Amino acid sequence: MNELALTPYLDKVICGDALQVLSELPDECIDLGITSPPYNKKHKHGGWLVPKVVYKGATDVLPEEAYQAWQIQVLNELYRITKEGGSFFYNHKVRYENGKMFHPIEWLLKTKWTVWQEIIWHRRIAGNIRGWRFWQVEERIYWLVKGKPTELKPQHAKLTSVWEIRPERAHKDHPAVFPLELPTRIIYAILEDRPGTVIDPFCGTGTTLVAAKLLDKNYVGIEISPEYVAYAEQRLAQAHTEKATVHKEIALHSVELTFRERKARGYWAEKR
Ligand SMILES: C[S@@+](CC[C@H](N)C(=O)[O-])C[C@H]1O[C@@H](n2cnc3c(N)ncnc32)[C@H](O)[C@@H]1O
């Protein structure tokens, strides 16, 4: 029933406002979500190493309180449409403004989701280098769950809670593109070979959707900018050209011995 109501949105990039489009989707129809929303960077945080983050077709300037309230609303809609046992991976960062710190956990704890894990995305490089603080080269990825998720297999869990993945350099038409490895890691670890539907409500150039397609999952993308929608559609049509990156990531998901076998052999502590 829910699956049927989802059909018009399946394997599509919908051009529209995330909250509006999400409100049209049926309850409990999605297995997994991944997104990086606009960060409310207010256009003034340019970098010495990378250009300013300015989207075509959307502003990123809200009073912080309104921004957080909006994110809570979006996350709660995502909770509604996610199946029991499903997960959502939410990429954000700790921001500083006028001496005040804004931490994503502030609003995540106000949503219906359970925060299952905080993952550090070590990018190794970032745009801003000023001496006011130590160079912030990390972002955060929050694994949010609805109910209890399936336990990760050892080959995925051993990838640790610190993900060292360099930022994407291609797709210069967009200022904040995911490296393809990132959604690939999440989809492959969470859904493995099972079928499922993956959503990205702020899908930009469609990186999450490309990963989903190459891993044989269904997807739903939402993006407000018609230009980025067109770009994502073009990327999806040529997704096979990005297969090598997906295979490289999948190759990292391997273990010679499971945690249980290591313990049985007394290898619990790493031998150096
Ligand atoms: C951080 S980017 C996501 C980039 C994406 N992960 C990728 O790999 O290309 C955030 C995206 O949200 C879009 N956006 C901004 N406001 C939106 C809204 N209200 N509804 C849907 N999309 C929106 C922006 O146009 C931008 O492309």
Image (cartoon, rainbow, N blue to C red):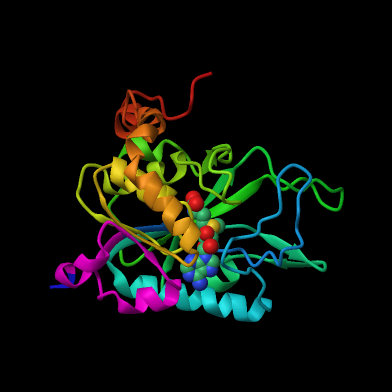
Residue 151 lies in the magenta stretch: no
The reply, left or right, for residue 110 in relation to residue 201 is right
> Is residue 233 among the parts visible in the rendering?
yes
Residue in the foreground of this view, choosing between 13 and 27: 13
Residue 228, percent across and down? 48, 57
Q: Quadrant of residue 215?
A: top left
Residue 21 lies in the magenta stretch: yes
The reply, left or right, for residue 4 in relation to residue 124 is left
Residue 223, percent across and down? 45, 64
Q: State the residue at coordinates (30%, 40%).
A: 214
Quadrant holding the N terminus: bottom left
> Is residue 118 among the parts visible in the rendering?
no
The reply, left or right, for residue 195 in relation to residue 69 is left
Name the outermost residue toward the right: 131
Q: State the residue at coordinates (20%, 50%).
A: 195
Q: Is residue 202 above or below residue 155?
A: below
Q: State the residue at coordinates (61%, 41%).
A: 123
Name the outermost residue toward the top: 272
Q: State the residue at coordinates (41%, 36%).
A: 158
Residue in the foreground of this view, choosing between 213 and 261: 213
Q: How many marks?
A: 0
Residue 45, percent across and down? 75, 58
The reply, left or right, for residue 148 in relation to residue 176 is left
Residue 241, percent across and down? 37, 33
Q: Which residues are magenta?
A: 3-31
Q: Is residue 116 above or below residue 241?
A: below
